Image (cartoon, rainbow, N blue to C red):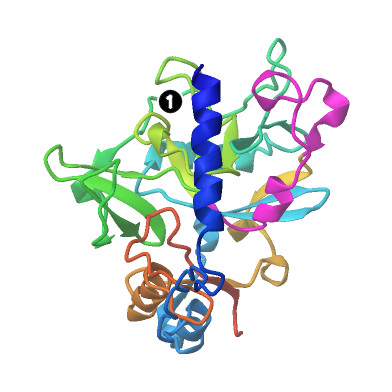
Amino acid sequence: MYLHRLNGLTMAAVLGLAQLPAHAAPIRIKAPAELPAKASVADAIKASKPSDWRALDPDNTLYLEIPAGRVVMELAPEFAPQHVANIKALVAEQYYDGLAINRVQDNWVAQWGDPNEKNPKPIQHARRTLPGEFTVPLKNVSSFTRLPDVDGYAPQVGHSNGFPSARDPKTGTAWLTHCYATVGVGRDNASDSGGGTELYAVIGQSPRHLDRDITVIGRVVAGMPLLSTLPRGTAPMGFYDSPEKSVPIKAIRLAADVPPEQRAKLEVMRTDSAAYQAVLEAQRNRGGPWSKVAAGHIDVCSAAIPVREAGK
């Protein structure tokens, strides 16, 4: 009975449409208005001055050398002083050389360390574990340029000396945020079970729910495609199911220990500069002709920090 009634209603609707005048105007959907032209990120970079850029500090820059090339990482000792010092000690004793990237989980991380948990590589002078450095006191952070945009994970977000960061004035703490290219310290359940022997870089969407649960020691500033395009592991959590599939690490070196002519000649835009504020605004409110809607908002992890070759 219901089906017959429905068919009857449908037929009535069809008959009603048939009675519309043949000359009825078609319904037109108004196209979005074109946004006025605005300066782009490229425009902001082009207009920047030499003083808007800073060179990487060789004493806080690591080179991860894999068969496909070099990944450049900048360390953040203000936010994880013990771990950064320990990682430098591991690098000095060439602990990472000959280890491997043994986990690549889609939309998550590329992780490297010792794949042989039952018979781990010996450590000479560094420490295997350290207390977690998930946050630091606000007084330990020398610079913070706050974003005006609302954040869902922290009372305040912005940038500290080139690193995406967050802070909570009520607790008096600050921390680095988990964004694309963030480098963190792998650990087990205990907060003091990591020390830098296992590291990872975020290769997917920003897992901000990890903020304040893992020690973050820096970020990749160049070479991310070498990590993000690696074959995904097929074992649980993205681990490779056989050692042959792992990506060998040729070496990890501190830039200060590499001859100057072999160092990466890179500059990072200063996040406390007017030029970077122009970059942020270009991303926050894009102009036409392609963009039809200005977002009016930017997330701390989508606020890309320009990096360029020195002298360009």
Q: Nearer the viewer, residue 228 or 29?
A: 29
Q: Nearer the viewer, residue 133 or 261?
A: 133
Q: Is residue 87 visible?
A: no
Q: Which x, y percent locates residue 201? A: 58, 42
Q: Residue furthest top?
A: 118
Establish if 22 lies above or below 150. below
Residue 21 falls left or right of residue 208: right
Residue 199 falls left or right of residue 104: left
Q: Which residues are magenta?
A: 219-248
Establish if 63 lies above or below 295. above
Q: Nearer the viewer, residue 303 or 221?
A: 303
Point 69% across, 46% down: residue = 227
Residue 58 falls left or right of residue 78: right
- Label 1: how many Cα within 10 Å (few below 14, some 14–19, many 20+): some
Point 34% across, 51% down: residue = 165
The residue indicated by pointer 1 is: 130
Q: Amino acid at mark 1?
A: Leu
Establish if 112 lies above or below 84. above
Q: Secondary structure at mark 1?
A: loop
Establish if 84 lies above or below 73. above
Is 220 colored magenta in this rendering? yes
Q: Residue furthest left?
A: 170
Q: Residue furthest right?
A: 244
Q: Which x, y percent locates residue 28? A: 49, 71
Point 70% across, 22% down: residue = 121
Q: Which x, y percent locates residue 205? A: 53, 44
Is 266 colored magenta in this rendering? no
Q: Is residue 238 visible?
A: yes
